[in-house]
Image (tube, rainbow, N blue to C red):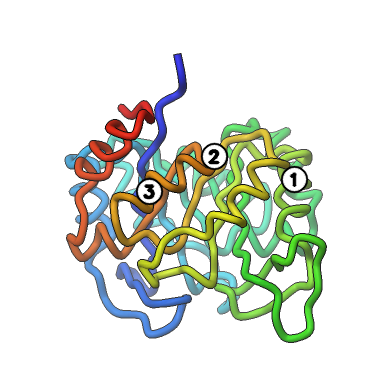
Amino acid sequence: MSVALRVIPCLDVDAGRVVKGVRFVGLRDAGDPVELARRYDADGADEVTFLDVSASSSDRATTVETVTSAAEQVFVPLTVGGGVRGVADVERLLRAGADKVGINTAAIARPEVITEIARRFGNQVVVVSVDARRCRDGAVTPSGYEVTTHGGRRGTGMDAVAWAAEAADRGAGEVLLNSIDADGTTDGFDLPMLREVRAEVDVPLIASGGAGTVQHFVEAADAGADAVLAASVFHFATLGIAEVKEALARAGHPVR
């Protein structure tokens, strides 16, 4: 039997509130993270992801209190990212109630940390988040996609497809592929990038950035995503989780 495709709301948290913008700028308030997580749990979300969008850029740790409060009230798996730098941060978040931990900037700075976390807690805990954009500002990579850090504000010159494959080889249990170009636009996922990464990565692949219609989710699944993640369309009630799952099921993708 095929593994069910997961539908995951993403809560971008800044200063204790859920925010959402376009390409990580122009942020507007979308509500209380615990209340939203509780609503999504009731609505049938398969998981909920918390990302502290300012943790890396402002050099501070993810707010553990929010995770603890959510874990007490939400019964689907929680993935938490933002400001994670090593084993100690992961342990703190797991103790607070997270099931998986996302890592981005710190893994780029020191890729060995992926293996260290995986060996300590298991591959299933490690989600490597890859914020990628089409090359610009003189950057050139073999795939045409570049890895960014600090909420998409800094280019690295690293090839996004190669980095996703390396992260999986080093022990990541999943790769969260977020298109900086598509983020918040509701114009659809970056399907060419998704297909390129899918061809090189064997671990579960989460598509993120650009969802605006139920068809966009179907297209991402057709391109090889094992899970589809979105924020704006769920936070502002453009689409419901059940609506997305129904469209995926009609297209032949198994869902829970």
* Quadrant where the image shows the N terminus: top left
Mark 2 or mark 1, earlier in chain: 1
Relative vertical location of residue 47 with respect to residue 155 in this rendering, above or below? above
Residue 165: which numbered mark, if any? 1
Lower sequence index among marks 1 and 3: 1
Front-most of residues 165 and 136: 136
Circle 3 — which element? helix
x%, y% of residue 220?
A: 46, 47
Could you tell me how far apart the alpha carbons at marks 3 and 2 are, in whole angstroms?
Answer: 11 Å
Q: Are marks 1 and 3 in contact (CB under 8 Å)?
A: no
Q: Name the one closer to the observer, 244 or 19.
A: 244
Q: Which residue is mark 2?
A: 224
* Residue 15 coordinates in the image, percent (x, y): 37, 74
Q: Residue furthest top?
A: 1
The mark closer to the camera, 2 or 1, is 2
According to the picture, the residue beneath numbered tag 3 turns out to be: 217
Q: Residues within 10 Å of mark 2 (few under 14, many from 20)?
A: some
Q: What amino acid type is highlighted by mark number 2?
A: Gly
